[in-house]
Image: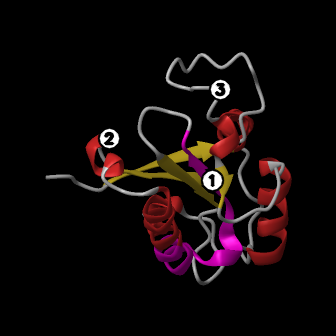
């Protein structure tokens, strides 16, 4: 029997660039030995049509949605990355179309949960041993506060 795997990680602004490089495969020198570079061309993003600058996108989201009265701390959590996957056997039983539907439904769930305007990327990696999605978002609450703790 397969299970859904959902792991959420918090990132401060100093860590965001590394996640961008990994998600968008911006470096040929990745230390991740599970990446099959021949399959990287099959990766896609459900939220963006092309590569984005995560720090710039976070800044835009905060400029449009942050309603706090205090300045944002330099060590604040400005991004969360939600990893969505299952075991390899689960994906082997699915056609590529069904795999894409699995990730689309997951994306739709988190779009509703976090707010589409707060999502910066939904990268699907098909070039590793097990397909998975990294959904990156800015943890803004409905009342415009930056709080990963509240959202998670």
Question: From the viewer's perspective, is residue 11 above or below residue 21?
Answer: below
Q: Position of residue 65 (x, y in %)?
A: 75, 76
Tell me the element at label 2: helix
Q: Which mark is residue 24?
A: none
Q: Based on the displayed image, in which of its 4 quarters is residue 40 positioned?
A: top right
Q: Which residue is mark 2?
A: 88
Image point (42%, 57%), residue name: 95
Q: Are marks 2 and 1 in contact (CB under 8 Å)?
A: no
Q: Nearer the viewer, residue 73 or 123?
A: 123
CA separation in Å, label 1 and label 3? 27 Å
Residue at the far front: name it.
95
Q: Residue at x 74, y 73 (%)?
A: 66
Mark 3 lies on residue: 37
Q: Looking at the image, what colour scheme do you see? A: secondary structure
- Mark 3: few/some/many CA within 10 Å (<14, 14-19, 20+): few
Local crowd at mark 1 within 10 Å, few (<14), some, or many (≥20)? many
Contact (CB < 8 A) between labels 1 and 3?
no
Taking the image as shown, residue 101 lies to the left or right of residue 15, namely left
Labels 3 and 2 touching (C-beta < 8 A): no
Q: Tell me where the magenta segment starts and ends, as one range.
A: 108-126
Identified at 71% across, 16% down, the residue is: 29
Give how far across and how far down residue 112 sits, in percent.
52, 81
| 63 over 120 or under it: above or below | below
Q: Mark 2 to mark 1: distance in Å?
A: 28 Å
Instruction: Report the residue marked by disc 1.
Output: 79
């Amino acid at each position: 029997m397969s299970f859904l795997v959902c792991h959420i990680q918090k990132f401060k602004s100093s860590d965001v660039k590394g996640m961008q490089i990994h998600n968008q495969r911006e470096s040929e020198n990745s230390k991740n030995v599970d990446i099959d570079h021949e399959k990287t061309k099959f990766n896609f993003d459900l939220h963006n049509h092309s590569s984005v600058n995560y720090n710039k996108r976070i800044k835009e989201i905060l400029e449009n949605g942050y309603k706090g009265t205090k300045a944002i701390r330099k060590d604040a959590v400005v991004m969360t990355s939600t990893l969505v996957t299952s075991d390899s056997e689960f994906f082997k039983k699915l056609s590529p179309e069904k795999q894409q539907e699995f990730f689309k439904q997951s994306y739709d769930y988190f779009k509703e949960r976090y707010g589409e305007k707060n999502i910066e990327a939904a990268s699907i990696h098909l070039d590793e041993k097990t397909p998975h999605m990294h959904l990156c978002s800015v943890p803004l609450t409905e009342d415009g506060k930056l709080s990963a703790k509240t959202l998670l």
